Structure formats: structure tokens, C-alpha cells
Image (cartoon, rainbow, N blue to C red):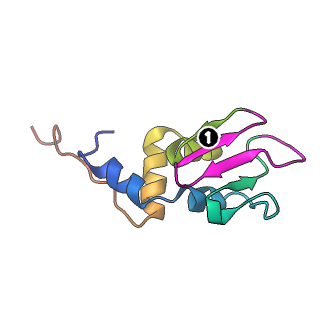
Amino acid sequence: MSLPPGFLDELRNRLSLGQVVGRKVMWDTRKSNQGKGDLWASCPFHQEKTPSFSVEPDKQFYYCFGCGKGGNAVGFIMDYENIEYPQAIESLASSMGLEVPREESAQHQ
């Protein structure tokens, strides 16, 4: 997948990791402090009784203290939906109302 320069930056700038993850998990309102950008939920990647999955929207990073999974929005979608990088970019772009541009480098030579 060859993307034009700047597209990933535009996508990252538009994304809210809290919203991306929030579509897949239920936030623990007792442990989360949204005012400080501190969101907690039960991990979607393993079974647990106490929420150990943390999302820091300001830093665009998630981490589970139980299973050790962590990363950004693209990595979350890849892991959660069990898809590859190009499909994760397509999924996130679509959710943001963006069309993934294609470079025409080798299409008509």
C-alpha cells in the first residue's frame, strides 16, 4: 500500500483514539477520569474481572496492564478486527469519512 505523503498525518490528526476504542469497549466510569484524559475498560483482548486496559487519548496510546498489548489506533484496529495494516487504514479512514488516496505511480506505464 503506497500512500501519498501527508495522508497518514491527516488521518492521525483527525482520529480520536478514545472514540475508536470506545466503539469496541465499555468505559469503566468509576476508574476513568475523562477530564484528565484517562480512560479505563476491561481489555477486549483477554478475559479479566478488573479493568486493566488504559487509553490516553492525548497521547494517542493504549496499553493493557494485564496482557501487555499496546499501541496506537491502527494497531488497535489490526488486533481487534484481526486484519492487516492496509485494511486497518481503510477502516479508520472510512470511519472518519476519508477516502484513502491511491498513488498512480505504476498503474499506466
* The C terminus lies in quadrant: top left
Q: Vertically, is 4 above or below 14?
A: above
Q: Amino acid at mark 1?
A: Asp
Residue at (62, 45) in percent of width and height: 62
Q: Residues within 10 Å of mark 1 (few under 14, many from 20)?
A: some
| Residue 55, position as x, y percentages in the image | 64, 50
| Residue 45, position as x, y percentages in the image | 74, 42
Residue at (43, 42) in percent of width and height: 86
In this view, the residue in front, 31 or 100, is 31
- The residue wearing badge 1 is 79
Residue farthest along the left direction in this orientation? 109
Question: Main SS type for the magenta part?
Answer: loop
- Residue 12 in magenta stretch: no
Is residue 23 in view from this perspective? no
Residue at (79, 57) in percent of width and height: 31
| Residue 53, position as x, y percentages in the image | 73, 46
- Residue 60 in magenta stretch: yes
Q: Which residues are magenta?
A: 46-67
